[in-house]
Image (cartoon, rainbow, N blue to C red):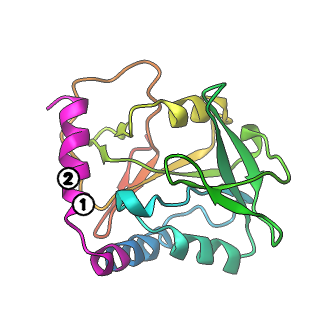
Amino acid sequence: MNKAELRKKYKALRLEFSEEKIEELSLEIANQLLRLPVWKKEFYHLFLSIAEQKEIDTENILHILQGKDKNVVLSKTNIKEHKLEHFLLTDTSVLRKNRWNIPEPEGGIPIPPEQLDVVFVPLLAFDEEGHRIGYGKGFYDNFLSECKPEVVKIGLSFFEAEPAFKEVFSSDIPLDYCVTPNKIYSFKN
């Protein structure tokens, strides 16, 4: 299958999930994350879920990060420049949904991508080599290219890996890990 077919397949599979199933699988993913060796870092970038797209609910991960007193960074989409801007989540952060129903900070304390230690990456599908398929807009590949080389990139998926994708581009940035409800995939050499 090509990327467009895989996007369609995994969007359809997610839409079949009930809210209870999403909650259950999201909690299992959060519990799996606790097994990764990434909890001594300082700055963690987290995406907030698009509930309408039945994405993984990242609220449990947010609670883990806050419980460990970590700096949580959220993105705001800059459509004009086709990039993400990043802001520290604080008690005074105001979140609003953008045109794609992504909850985003209205502003706040900017954090440059080079300061991030760990990035939780949204995706629709991933392969056994650590390549991911997102919504196809390229925002995350652009963002990850601005991060320091040693940033830890963790994909989150309800589903297991696909065989190696045929369509991989030089601008595609592979994951270091992908966490599913049942397994942790490690792509670090």
Spot occupied by residue 83 in the image (x, y as percentages of width and height): 63, 31
The one nearer the camera, 38 or 136, is 136
Residue at the spot x=47%, y=21% of the render? 171
Residue at the spot x=65%, y=71% of the render? 65
Q: Is residue 69 left or right of residue 13?
A: right
- Which quarter of the picture shows residue 147? top right
Q: Quadrant of the N terminus?
A: top left
Range of residues picked out in magenta: 1-23
Residue 68 falls within the magenta-colored stretch:
no
Spot occupied by residue 4 in the image (x, y as percentages of width and height): 24, 31
User: Which amino acid type corresponds to the residue marked 1 in the rendered image?
Assistant: Leu
Residue 12 badge: 2
User: Which amino acid type corresponds to the residue marked 2 in the rendered image?
Assistant: Ala
Residue at the spot x=79%, y=51% of the render? 107
The one nearer the camera, 3 or 115, is 3
Q: Is residue 41 above or below residue 17?
A: above
Spot occupied by residue 47 in the image (x, y as percentages of width and height): 56, 55
Mark 1 lies on residue: 15
Q: Are marks 1 and 2 in contact (CB under 8 Å)?
A: yes
Q: Residue furthest top?
A: 170
Q: Residue furthest front?
A: 99
Q: Is residue 91 left or right of residue 151?
A: right
Q: Is residue 64 above or below residue 170?
A: below
- Which quarter of the picture shows residue 130? top left
Q: SS at mark 1?
A: helix
